Structure formats: structure tokens, C-alpha cells
Amino acid sequence: MNDAELIRCIRERDETALSALETRFGRRLGKVARNILKNEEDVSECLNDVYLKAWNSLPAAAPDNLEAYLTALTRNTALNRVRDGNAQKRIPQELILPLDEAAGSIPHVDRDDTAAIAESRSEEERIKAVINTFSEKLPEKDQKVFVARYYYDASVNKIARCLGMPGGTVKSTLHRLRNELARRLKEEGIEV
């Protein structure tokens, strides 16, 4: 199919146009997305988004050069995924919890156990114990922000959306919590 036929099929909502788009341009578009995203799952999701955007936009806009249009659409979609934090480290589905459940999933370590851990485990284990103890004792909302950011690597925008908070509030909460944690680590004799 040439460009005009592909655009005509999309206008007519002929679903074979989607597979024709993928067959004809998938390799090139995949290369563009791969150069930006570096992760095959993100590349696949990006290309699916591109095909959907093309499906929705092409009936109204008939570009002179379909390949150039799709390439620009792919580049912009991939860059937006990176900027918005949609392309991130993959966490196995079974480990992903809603924020309210995730806050309660931190292993419990009593303050008294921190000293015992320091003697019997490596410095890394000691740091983990102090951080876990610190996060456990936070007020609920602060704990959710802390866990989402530092355990699940959620973006500030995502945390703000999920918790119904302004982004600036999330940033200031994270700043305050980092300072408190640094102070707590220093009290435990851990240099940061």
C-alpha cells in the first residue's frame, strides 16, 4: 500500500491499515524509539501509542510525507514517555502495590534492633534498617510520599496525582524528609 491508500484506509476505519502501517514503517519507527528508550517493552508501548495517535489524527490531517510524519510522531512520543517518567525500570507486577498498601509493606525493624543489626550485618544492612525504621515512623501521608518516591521510583507528578496533592507540596515533603533522614543517619554514625 502506498501513502495515499494507507491514509484512505485509516479514514475509512479499515483496521487492516494498522497492520499495513506496522509492516511498512515498524522497523524504522522501532529504531527511532529504541534510540531514545533503550528498553524493548517501552519501545513496544511507544509504537502502540504511535499507531493509535496516527489512527486518530490521520483522518483530519493528510501529511505530504507519511513516513516523516510517523517518524516525528514516534520521536515525540518516545521523548514524552521519557520526560513524563513513563519509561522506567520495570518492576515485576507481583511487587507493585497501590500506594496505600505499599506504605504498610516496609519490613518492621525496632529501634533497639538497629544496634544489633549494626553489629551483626554489613554497613548496607545497617543503612537499610535505619531507613526502614525512619520510614515506618513517618505520618501516613509522608510515608506514602517517601515509599512511592524512594522504594518505587515514582515521579513527583505521579505521586501528586495518586495522592491528590500539589506537585510543590510533594517536592517540599521530599526535601524535608531527605533532611530528616540525613539527620537520622548522622545520629546513627552513618556518613552521607
Image: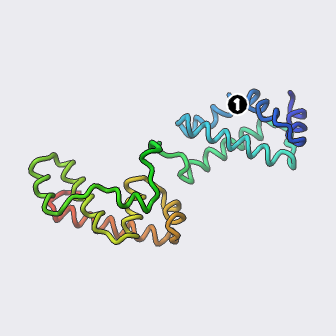
Q: Residue at x 90, y 38 (%)?
A: 8
Tell me residue 25's x, y (percent).
74, 30
Look at the image and tell me in which quarter the C terminus lies: bottom left
How many marks on residues? 1
Task: Please indicate whether residue 95 sits to the left or right of residue 14 in the image.
Answer: left
Task: Please indicate whether residue 149 sits to the left or right of residue 14 in the image.
Answer: left
Q: Amino acid at mark 1?
A: Gly
Tell me residue 40's x, y (percent).
55, 34
Tell me residue 162's x, y (percent).
52, 63
Please give the residue where the numbered disc 1 appears in the rendered image: 26
Q: Secondary structure at mark 1?
A: helix
Q: Residue at x 67, y 40 (%)?
A: 48
Q: Quadrant of residue 182?
A: bottom left
Q: How is the image coloured?
A: rainbow
Nearest the camera: 9 or 188?
9
Task: Please indicate whether residue 38 sits to the left or right of residue 65 in the image.
Answer: left
Q: Residue at x 31, y 69 (%)?
A: 138
Task: Please indicate whether residue 55 sits to the left or right of residue 181 in the image.
Answer: right
Tell me residue 91's x, y (percent).
45, 44
Q: Residue at x 35, y 60 (%)?
A: 104
Is residue 155 placed above or below 49 in the rendered structure? Answer: below
Is residue 23 placed above or below 180 in the rendered structure? Answer: above
Look at the image and tell me in which quarter the N terminus lies: top right
Q: Judge the density around disc 1: few (<14), some (14-19), many (≥20) Cα neighbours within 10 Å.
A: some
